[in-house]
Amino acid sequence: MKEYLENINKAFESKARLGIMSVLLVDDRVDFNTLKETLQLTDGNLASHLRALEEAKYLQVEKQFVGRKPNTTYQATEAGREAFKSHLDALEQLILNNRQSD
């Protein structure tokens, strides 16, 4: 059991960060408002989780203007994709191991 827990990444423990990474693995590049609406998070809550993932080098941020409005988009980095997939694999193994012991 301990070996499965070692591979669980603390960066993805929150529901919001799981959601962010899940969306970014499905859609290559997503803007702030789409993430906010999809995950039903407040601006501040979403921004703090995005910042944490960016600091972990799991997200790439691109800021640009569309017309006169600022538009920020996010994309999972290769390191972020690998870390998230490893995290999901660890969760899957933990669940499978738990079911087998029942």
Image (cartoon, helix red, strand yellow):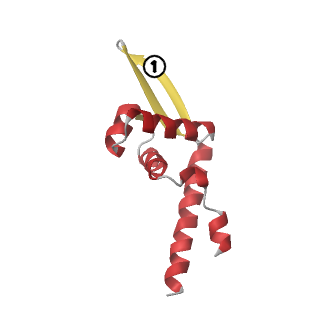
Task: Please state the horizontal and vertical placement of residue 67, each as a whole percent of the image.
Answer: 34, 13
Q: Is residue 42 above or below residue 71?
A: below
Looking at the figure, which quarter contains the N terminus?
bottom right
Task: Please state the horizontal and vertical placement of residue 13, each as a whole percent of the image.
Answer: 53, 55
Identify which residue is drawn at 52% across, 85% down: 100
Q: Residue tagged by mark 1?
A: 64
Task: Please state the horizontal and vertical placement of residue 25, each as a whole percent of the image.
Answer: 46, 48
Type of the residue with mark 1: Gln
Identify which residue is drawn at 31% across, 39% down: 37
In-front residue for pair 64/35: 35
The total of numbered circles placed on residues is: 1
- Quarter of the image for residue 24 reads top left
Q: Secondary structure at mark 1?
A: strand
Asked whether residue 29 appears in the rendered view, the answer is no
Identify which residue is drawn at 37% across, 41% down: 41
Task: Please state the horizontal and vertical placement of residue 64, each as a whole percent of the image.
Answer: 45, 19
